[in-house]
Image: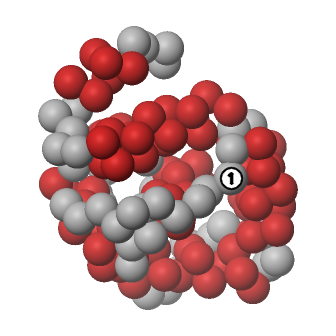
Amino acid sequence: MQTDIKAFVESNKCINYNHDFRFIELQEIDQETDWDDLVDAIYPYYVKSKTSHILLTVESMLRIYILTRHFEMSPSGIEKALFQVDNLRDFALIDLDRDEIPSAACITEFSSLLFEQSLLIKIEDTLKAKPIEAKHCTTF
């Protein structure tokens, strides 16, 4: 997924520098994260709940969790953003032809699972090389 930064920004029609920078950070997180290690840690706890009708892969849900942290968005905010922003769907490995966007309730449920199983520490430790830091607020 190595691309020229200028081409990456232009292809994503980013509006301002802070917005551009956040998408570039996502590219770096994607490249530097050992997704298999995180998925292996979460998978045993990831089961379909009776209230969630959408079940994406563990990796997709993990990536959505990271998006909520990276963009400081609520579950309902990231749900709306996933409908509107191709780059976010690409990062979350969501293809609208085969996948549904998870509801805010489903995203919240996954976040709760991570918290209840003490998996947030594992995620943060894995992402330490590229910590998820708050930048200026971005709206979609």
Residue 114 higher or lower than 17, as above or below: below
Could you tell whether 99 is left or right of 28 in the image? left
| Chosen colour scheme | secondary structure
The quadrant of the image that shows the C terminus is bottom left
- Of residue 29 and residue 108, the one placed in the foreground of this image is 29
Q: Name the residue carrying label 1.
A: 131
Of the residues shown, which amino acid type is indicated by label 1?
Answer: Pro
Q: How far across and down, in percent of the image, does residue 66 sit?
A: 55, 58
Instruction: Give me the residue at 40% from left, 41% from top.
Output: 21
Q: How far across and down, in percent of the image, does residue 93 sit?
A: 42, 41
Could you tell whether 136 is left or right of 81 in the image? right
Quarter where residue 29 is shown = top right
Could you tell whether 82 is left or right of 38 in the image? left
Residue 114 higher or lower than 2, as above or below: below
Q: How far across and down, in percent of the image, does residue 114 sit?
A: 69, 74
Q: Taking the image as drawn, is residue 103 in sight? A: no
Neighbour tally class for label 1: few under 14, some 14-19, many 20 plus, Cα within 10 Å: few
Could you tell whether 13 is left or right of 27 in the image? left
- Of residue 48 and residue 137, the one placed in the foreground of this image is 137
Q: How far across and down, in percent of the image, does residue 88 sit?
A: 34, 47
Instruction: Give me the residue at 71% from left, 81% from top.
Output: 115
Quarter where residue 124 is shown = bottom right
Instruction: Give me the residue at 23% from left, 45% from top.
Output: 16
Residue 26 higher or lower than 66, as above or below: above
Instruction: Give me the residue at 22% from left, 32% from top.
Output: 12
Q: Describe the element under mark 1 as helix, strand or loop.
A: loop
